[in-house]
Amino acid sequence: MVILSTDDMFEVHLSSLIADYDKVTVTNLYQPIIGYAAMSVYFTLISEAHNQKHTSISNHEHLFLQMGISSGEFIQARKALEGVGLLKTYLTNENGVKFYRYEIYAPKAPNSFLDDVLLYGILVKYIGKEEAQRYKQIYQKDSSLSGGENISASFKEVYNPNLDEESYMEVLQNNKKDLKGRNSAKINTQFSYEKFFKFVRNNSKLDENCFKSKELKEIERIATLYGANEEETALTIIGFYNEMNDLGNRVDFESVNNILREKAGYYMLGKKASAGSSSHVTSDSDLAQKINIMDKYSPKKYLSILQNGTKPASSDLLILDSLSKNFGLANPVINVVVDYVLAKNNNRFIRAYAEKVAASLARERIDNALDAMTYLIKGNKRTKLNGNKKYDLKGDALRTSKTQHTLSKKELDEVNELLDELGVNVEDGKA
């Protein structure tokens, strides 16, 4: 990790001509993605590039004081600019002094931005489709005037160029000078096809020959858009690959897009799965015992119990890992997901279905088995019980000791119906 100090020196270069309308483009189209702080850094660095033509190279303390920001805030803003191709950063170390070179690039022209599936896609993600569509209307071409004959003179007609003249020969011989023009940097997605195909080969019979280049570009775009890593992308693609279709049309990108979009928020949370809170169920009923088993055992052990003690398949373990790592679910909640998915899919543990259920539970911040089971059985309505209360399953109702919330006998029967569908006897732990 590189630590940025106030004493570190920097210089700024403009790698492109930047016009006034470029600043409007950055404000309208880039600011919703990078934020106002990054936009301020962008414009300040442009100003600094002009200032450094007349003054010596500055240190970062000067920059931080000018903008009133900290080193950490500047680094976050800088990365946001680098991510969308507005800035490139180079670092050298000379005799213990770190020297940064910031290269500023022009934004894409509005039509190029709005035609770029990655940039426009991330804009829609940040501000919504309706607001993004409003910017499309702002930058629409004026309707062309129809009618009339085009009588405009041509260049040749007016200037009659003689390409044998010396002034033209220099250009024709490619004797170009390094002149500054309009230059937009390519966005660095950092998506590794090598890693992607490694996971594809390890988890399926597919390989590089199973994909056309247009499919690979779309895979890279979607993965970058939703922040999915190569492993998660590969496993999702495998699930929606149909070998019966013609080569080049075998990936169901609509489903892939929906799955990765659904999970996108959880990649960015960066939270670790906790042990979860106990359901605090007190009863001798089968349901109480089942919930206590969910609280007690790890997902791997619990799935093994459901399979008469056999070891879970590696593909199932990958799903369990995803529920923990990508959604931050506690172990008891993952056990409920396992139960629910098996019940709804004839004892098949389907990854896409499991992750969709996990997304719902993660949104509700459910952290114990009883709340998770109650939430799912009640049709994903926002009626989860308080996870900090103790529950008593005696009698015909499910009551909390500190609240008036009560599940009716009908609702409790629904819980038992789910257990019957699974065919799990919690007393002996067999399926």
Image (spheres, grey):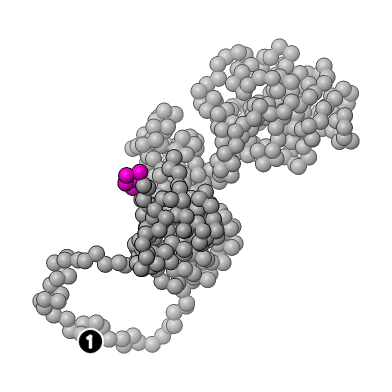
The residue depicted at 47 percent of the width and 64 percent of the height is 43
Q: Residue at x 36, y 68 (%)?
A: 54
Q: Quadrant of residue 167?
A: bottom left
Which amino acid, mark 1?
Val
The magenta stretch spans which residues? Answer: 91-96
Q: Count neighbours of disc 1 (C-alpha within 10 A) and say few if under 14, some if 14 to 19, many if 20 or more.
A: few
Q: For the point 61% across and 18% down, which residue is it?
A: 301
Residue 416 falls in image quadrant: top right
- Is 171 one of the magenta-colored residues? no
Q: In screen coordinates, is 384 left or right of 270?
A: right
Quadrant of the snapshot with the C terminus: top right
Residue that badge 1 annotates: 158
Could you tell me residue 407's position as x and y percent?
Answer: 84, 33
Q: Main secondary structure of the magenta part?
A: strand
| Quadrant including the N terminus | top left
Lateral position of residue 22 relative to residue 154, left or right? right
Magenta span contains residue 92: yes
Can see residue 76?
no
153 left or right, relative to 169: right
Instruction: Choose between 398 and 379: the one closer to the eye.
Output: 398
Q: Is residue 191 visible?
A: yes
- Measured from the top left, where is residue 387 in percent x and y? 77, 32
Foreground pick, 368 / 256: 368
In the figure, is residue 12 to the left or right of 343? Answer: left
- Image position, residue 71 (x, y; %): 50, 50
Mark 1 residue element: helix
